[in-house]
Image (cartoon, helix red, strand yellow):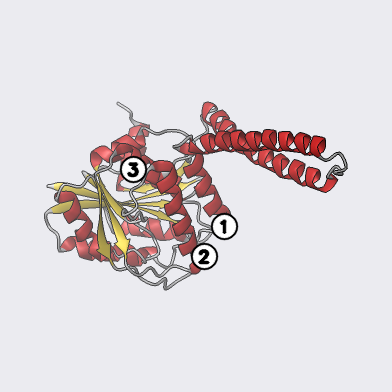
Amino acid sequence: MSKISFVIPCYRSARTIEGVVAEIQDTMAAIPQYVYEIILVNDCSPDETFEVIKALCVRYNNITGISLARNFGQHAALMAGLRRAGGDIIVCLDDDGQTPADEVGKLLAGIENGSDVVYASYENKHHSAFRNFGTWMNDIMTRMMLGKPKELHLTSYFAAKRFVVDSMLRYENSYPYIIGLVLRATRNISNVPVNHRSREVGTSGYTMKKLLGLWFNGFTAFSILPLRIATITGVIFAGAGFIYGIYTVVKKFVNPQVPLGFSSLMAAVVFIGGMLMIMLGLIGEYIGRIYISINNSPQYVVKEEVGNRGKEYEDKQADPL
C-alpha cells in the first residue's frame, strides 16, 4: 500500500489551514488504497498559525507540525517539509484553500500513469492581477533559464515520486528553488486540469520584494545564462563603441568643421556605465551566493516540531541508541 505525504507551507493561515486539513481527510477517506500523512510547516507566521497546527496534531495522529525560527520563504519551508516526508508520493499544496485538495486524485492518477511529477494546471486562475503578472514573469524566466517546455504549466500544487524528492533533497545550498530542483531531476512531467478557487480569507503573502527574490533565485541558482547574456551584451557594446569611434574619426577627417558632441558623448558614457554597473551587480550576486553557500548558511532552522513524527524526533534525540 503506497503512502502519500502532504506537505503544506503555512503563513498567515490560522483561519484556513484547518479547512484544508479537513478536506484532505475527507478526500483520502474515499481513496482507501493509500495511507497518508500531513506535514504542516509554519514559516514563522506572525498570527496563531502554529497554535492551530499544534491543535491539529493533538486531534490527528498522522499530522506533523514544524515551526521555523524565522521567515525563510515558501521554498525553504517546502524543503523542510520534504525532509520530514516519508511517503512514496509527495503532494505539495497551498495553505489558503485555493488549491483544491479534493482533486488530489487527478494528480495521483497521473503519477500512477507513469509521470514522475504531475502539476495542477488552472484554466481560470483566481489570483490578483499582481500575482498573475508574477506567475507570467516566472514562466518566462523558467523557459529561458531552465529550459521548461512552453506547454508545461508549473504551479504550487503538484505530486512527485519519491526518487524525485530524494534528488531534490541532495541540494543543500542556501537558496532552494523548487521548480529548478524538479526540472533538474526529471523531464517526465505532466499537467492535469483542476479548478482554482477564489481566496476567501486574507491576501497573498507574495510581495514585490519576495517575487523579485524568487526571480533572482531562478536566475542565479540553476543557470549561468545571465552571465553569458552579460558577456554577449558587453561584446556587442564594445563592438558598437569601436565602430562608432572609427565613424567619428572618419567624419572629422572628411568634414573638419564638425563640432565635437559633448551631449552625445555624455549620453553614451552614462548608458554604458549603467550597463557595466548592472553586469557587475549580476556578477556580485553570483559571488555573494557562492560566499554564503561556502559559509554553510542553512536553508532553514527548525525551532519546534510537534505531532507524531515530532515525537519520534524527540525520542531519538533523547535516546539515540
**Pointer 3 and pointer 1: residues touching (CB < 8 Å)?**
no
In the image, 133 versus 259, the foreground residue is 259
Crowdedness near tag 3: few (<14), some (14–19) or many (≥20) residues, C-alpha within 10 Å: some
Say which quarter of the image contains residue 170. top left
- Residue 36 position, x and y percent, is 22, 52
**In this rendering, position of residue 166 left or right of residue 270:** left
| Residue drawn where x is 58% and y is 54% of the image | 209
Report the residue marked by disc 1.
208
**In this rendering, position of residue 66 left or right of residue 121:** right
Callout 3 amino acid: Val
**Pointer 2 and pointer 1: residues touching (CB < 8 Å)?**
yes
Say which quarter of the image contains residue 321. top left
Report the residue marked by disc 3.
182
Residue 130: numbered disc: 2
Crowdedness near tag 2: few (<14), some (14–19) or many (≥20) residues, C-alpha within 10 Å: few
Rounded to the nearest angstrom, the CA distance separating label 2 from label 1 is 9 Å
| Label 3: which secondary element | helix
